[in-house]
Image (cartoon, helix red, strand yellow):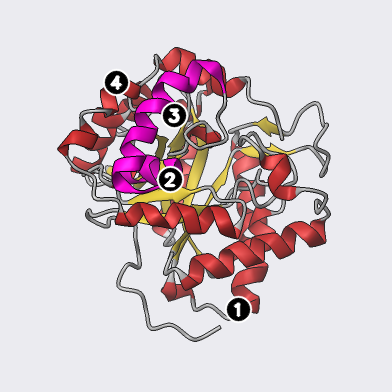
Amino acid sequence: MPQPTPSSLHPLIGRQPPSVLGLGLAALGRPGYINLGHGEDTGTGRSIEAMRERAFAVLDAAWRADIRYLDTARSYGRGEVFLGEWLRSREVPAEALTIASKWGYTYTADWRIEAEQHEVKNHSLAVLQRQWQETQSNLGGYLDLYQIHSATLDRGVLDDRAVHAELARLKAAGTRIGLTLSGPQQAVTLEQALTLQVDGVRLFDAVQATWNLLEPSSGAALDAAHRAGLAVIIKEALANGRLTERNQAASFQARRQRLETLAGRFKASLDAVALAAALTRPWASVVLSGAATEGQLLSNLNAVRVPWDDKAEALVETLAEDPTLYWQTRAELAWN
């Protein structure tokens, strides 16, 4: 792989709009995931070796496309391992990109798609300390941002002073600290997170949240976070595949027709249009592609060429679902 010059986008944390595409490894690090059609993407090549080869191919394609923000997590199967192996095998300089990971979920499926439970959530201090060491083993020297994975008010992590103190210690040592959000209370959770300080210093440098054409309810809160100085990363911009051609659900057809009309006007695919909507949020720093194949990534990349305009923006509110319904539907998505 050619040696890059230091990227002007590094570090992306704190980057001002326009936003850029990044790559998330949720669908690349394990054989089972909830994206529509994930089983088709992996096919019969679900061994660790086959998944590593696929992950490397997508990461190579992302590098060639100048994607310089990569996001993984302890619970993404071997996502951290694959990413670390790719970075070292390609001799990518740490200053050339931004690497983010997350702690708080433990992968428990043991590479089995039919597992009863794929991951277990635990935001205790002991888990943070254990997973930090694991992340350092996989990504040491590359990690820029460490995030609480799916912080919600009911889990208590935003009230745990011991966890806050440990995160502040990591921050003082040079790692930026963030949180990711999930569920219909994303905005309320973020509002509380913005108030957290340790020794007079704000704890969080970044927030990663779900925003898409079906679930845009976090927009105002993310705008507030941006204005407060946090980097804002958008995840699930394609709603786990529900905003792609794969969504054949009867309940989606009316929205799909409106999206297809818009896609036809832009001569773009549905996924490119949905990602373009996210990329045009004035408060966003990075929008993550969750591509599981090179073909999906190449299609996603067309989003940067979609000339989003006022007519397209007028459709945003007409496509939104009730947040409670959206998250209920997401919870019911099948693994593969």
Q: Residues within 10 Å of mark 2 (few under 14, many from 20)?
A: many
What is the distance, in whole Å, between disc 2 and disc 4 at their CAs?
19 Å
Quadrant of residue 318 in the image? top left
**Callout 2: helix, strand or loop?**
loop
Say which residue appears at 55% left-offset and 51% top-offset.
291
What is the distance, in whole Å, between disc 3 and disc 2 at their CAs?
39 Å
**Callout 1: helix, strand or loop?**
loop
Q: Residues within 10 Å of mark 4 (few under 14, many from 20)?
A: few
Query: Residue 259: x percent and y percent?
Result: 37, 32
Query: Residue 88: x percent and y percent?
Result: 62, 76
* Residue 76 visible, this angle: yes
Query: Residue 205: x percent and y percent?
Result: 34, 48
Mark 2 and mark 1 lie on one chain; the one further toward the N terminus is 1
Question: Which residue lies under the disc numbered 1?
Answer: 90
Q: Is residue 64 left or right of residue 119?
A: left
Say which residue appears at 18% left-offset and 34% top-offset.
311
Q: Residues within 10 Å of mark 3 (few under 14, many from 20)?
A: many
What's the magenta region?
A: 249-277
What amino acid is labelled 3 in the image?
A: Leu
Question: Which residue lies under the disc numbered 2?
Answer: 269
The C terminus lies in quadrant? top right
Q: Which mark is residue 272?
A: none
Mark 3 and mark 1 lie on one chain; the one further toward the N terminus is 1
Q: Is residue 7 left or right of residue 61?
A: left
Q: Which mark is residue 158?
A: 3
